[in-house]
Image (spheres, rainbow, N blue to C red):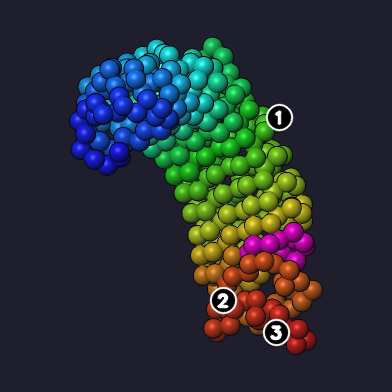
Amino acid sequence: MDGNNFSVLPQALENLVNLTYLDIDPNPLTALDSGVMSVIGRTLQTLLVDLSHFTAWPHELRLLRAINSLTLSKITFPRLSADAFHGMESTLHTLSITYSHLERMPIAICHLQNLQSLTFSSNDYLDLNTTVFEPCNRRFNSVTSLNLAGNKLRNFPVVFHTFPEITSLNLDSNQLRYINADLIPANNRVQSLSLNYNNFSRIPNVVNKLHSLTTLQMSYNHIGAIYDIDLHNLKALTYLYLTNNGLEFISSHAFRNNPNLYYVQLQYNLLRTISSSFTTLHSLGYFYLQNNQIECTCDLSHLKSWNVASINSFTGNCDSSTETLKQFLVNALPGCP
């Protein structure tokens, strides 16, 4: 029912006595009918709703007795009351708040006992002079996925004190340049870190404290080089995304401690050669180099021992010919002195 012109919940929904999923975002709703909500609330597990036309918080949400996934967009209030999610304290597993006028993540989430995934993204009205999080009197040990993308954050947020068990952290589309090492505890469990569309000029050394990291996404930053120490402690690293960074240099030992690296995206950079560091990656299965400036000459002789035929997908073209990189490495490079 998304993308229509409903200003009220259709009464016909009362006939759907086993309804589990309802997407009514976006619609110009101004309120949630308590009669409809009391009926669908017995079985509804997932709700997506646009609150941009609401003048008051819809307390009818507390009638959702089976809800486990709630997506709220365009909340027009700067703050929510502490009981905003009353009635779903034990049922709600996934909460998404996007494009709101909230100044902070609401204190109401402190009562969500079994929350596992939290998205608080694209909120342009955050007060960046204060902490993003309202103080809670407990830690969220159940939350494993945290998405804070698009909040214009200039400083890495203090997330691990409140969410010590997160395995997936998304900070895409912010304004980050630096990560304070003191904000990353040694016993963290992060497996996936996404920092796309920020302002990093180098892979921050602090990522090496993420001992369990398997996926690092830093596309669309300003990273011009990868040095020997940048990824030296990431033995579990499997997926690396560095598309569109202006990348010009990769050291010869950049990946010597990343034996599990399997998937690498380096498209739309300024590389003129292929680092010998890739020849040590025996697990490499997907390697994307298109839209670089690789010169296919005998200057690539340091790659002669590389078994590129074992790579499932190897994309990229020579800068001065129509030959693909893989064709040159397999057919022409062996003939170089």
Mark 3–mark 2 CB contact (< 8 Å): no
- Magenta segment, which residues? 277-287
Residue 284 shows in the view:
yes
Residue 234, given in percent of the width and then of the height, sits at: 72, 46
Q: Position of residue 103 (x, y in %)?
A: 36, 25
Front in this rendered view, residue 126 or 94: 94
Which residue does the image show at 24% across and 26% down from the upper left?
Answer: 11
> For residue 331, which numbered disc appears in the image?
3
Frontmost residue, 34 versus 296: 34
Q: Residue at x 56, y 56 (%)?
A: 242
| Location of mark 2 (residue) | 317
Of label 3 and label 1, which has the lower sequence position?
Answer: 1
In three-dimensional space, the C-alpha distance between marks 1 and 2, rounded to whole angstroms, equals 42 Å
Q: Residue 211: which disc? A: none
- Say what amino acid the circle numbered 3 marks: Asn
The residue identified by callout 1 is: 187
Please name the amino acid that badge 1 sits on: Asn
Look at the numbered discs 3 and 1 and tell me whether their residues touch, using CB distance below 8 Å: no
Image coordinates of residue 79 in percent, x first then y, are: 34, 20
The answer to whether any part of residue 128 appears in the image is no
Q: What's the residue type where badge 2 is placed? A: Asn
Q: What is the quadrant of residue 6 in the picture?
A: top left
Taking 215 as reference, is 155 above or below it? above
